[in-house]
Image (cartoon, helix red, strand yellow):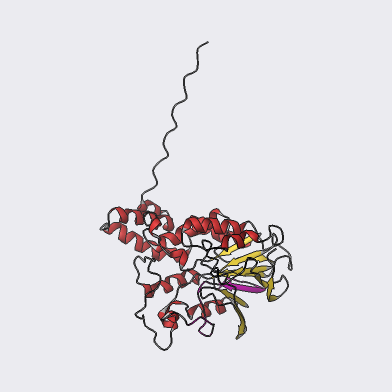
Amino acid sequence: GRSLPPPPPTPPPPPPPPPLNLQALGRCDEAFLAFGQALRLQPGNAEAWRGQALCLRDLPAWQSPRAQRLRSRFFIDAQLPKGSTRIFTVSDVHIGQPGAMDWAKAISRHTFQNDVLLVAGNVADTIRQLRFGLSVLRSKFRRVFFTPGNHELWVHPSEARTFPCSISKFLAILELCEELSMDVLPAAVSDGLFVVPLFSWYTAEFDEHDPHPGKYVFDTLCKWTHMDEEKVWKFFLQLNQQFLDLPLYGEVVTFSHFLPRRSLPYSRAIPGELKAIGCAALDEQLRAARSRAHVYGHTSVRHVATEEGVTYIQNALGGPEDHGPAHPLICVHDGTRMSAAKVDIA
């Protein structure tokens, strides 16, 4: 018999919509990335520059399709009974440093499958490392919440063609978290128990005695578009604003990467460090959210203390000199009440 003719070739996928079309469709996050690539190819493109500025204005409304999907995770655990969920925390894992990945892999695959982990930033410097680190942590817990630290927003030289600026990388991190079924926005984790992540950046105003940028420069691998560094913290606080008035009944746990309060300890070993570790307006936000406990990171100074009705907790893994192979998690909520107990990872 005669052989059948070969099937026609598969047509190529349609090209992505132009940035202006994305922006008109309310897809401001995708439009920002597309405008960024246009500017990389044509740095003087005034239309792309204006388009990015408008996208930055719209991002804090959280109305894009991706933002709506992230927001829709708020209710998925709201019907779980009280007492069914514990909340644990760690920060500053630095997954590329010696011993960090071994520590993450050593966390029991069974003990915490009904529980929640809060990861308060500085898991990795590159998006590739971040994917590895978050994937391992995600496999150990029922649910993982993450907020980026300064290291995540570095534009490493190997990523310069992919991420024209740190906001582009930030948006890619949100996309990665969605892909991994992780949380970056507020959500109920059981009946009457809520987690509220707070995006953050530092400000020189944290240094009360000299509230101005100093001679020491931090995070030189960050690249900010349409804002100088002293406006970055305001942008990230704006991302939190609409979530502070949610009707959260019961108990609330908040977390950020940077310090929300000047009284919290830091090493004092780095000149000018106080200007690059915190933001006092974060404390106003966490109290507006009616937080009972706030987790933070960045300084790698482990700490638990209650101040004016809020318990502040840092459980940094830190560098290889800072932890052993079985560094414990801290339980922020044991299912029935707030806690600060150390819990073995095995």
Q: Reply above or below: 259 against 175.
A: below
Q: Residue at x 32, y 53 (%)?
A: 38
Residue in the foreground of this view, choosing between 206 and 12: 206
336 within the magenta span? no
Q: Quadrant of residue 212?
A: bottom left
Q: Is residue 46 left or right of residue 208?
A: left
258 within the magenta span? yes
Q: Reply above or below: 230 against 54.
A: below
In magenta, the rendered stretch is: 244-268
Q: Is residue 110 left or right of residue 12?
A: right
Looking at the image, how many numbered discs can be counted on the residues?
A: 0
Residue in the foreground of this view, choosing between 48 and 133: 133
Q: Residue at x 37, y 73 (%)?
A: 229
The image position of residue 217, as x and y in percent, is: 37, 75
Q: Quadrant of residue 98?
A: bottom right
| Image quadrant occupied by the C terminus | bottom right
Query: Is residue 56 in sight in this rendering?
Result: yes
Q: Quadrant of residue 331?
A: bottom right
Q: Residue at x 62, y 82 (%)?
A: 305
The image position of residue 240, as x and y in percent, is: 50, 70
The image position of residue 130, as x and y in percent, is: 51, 59
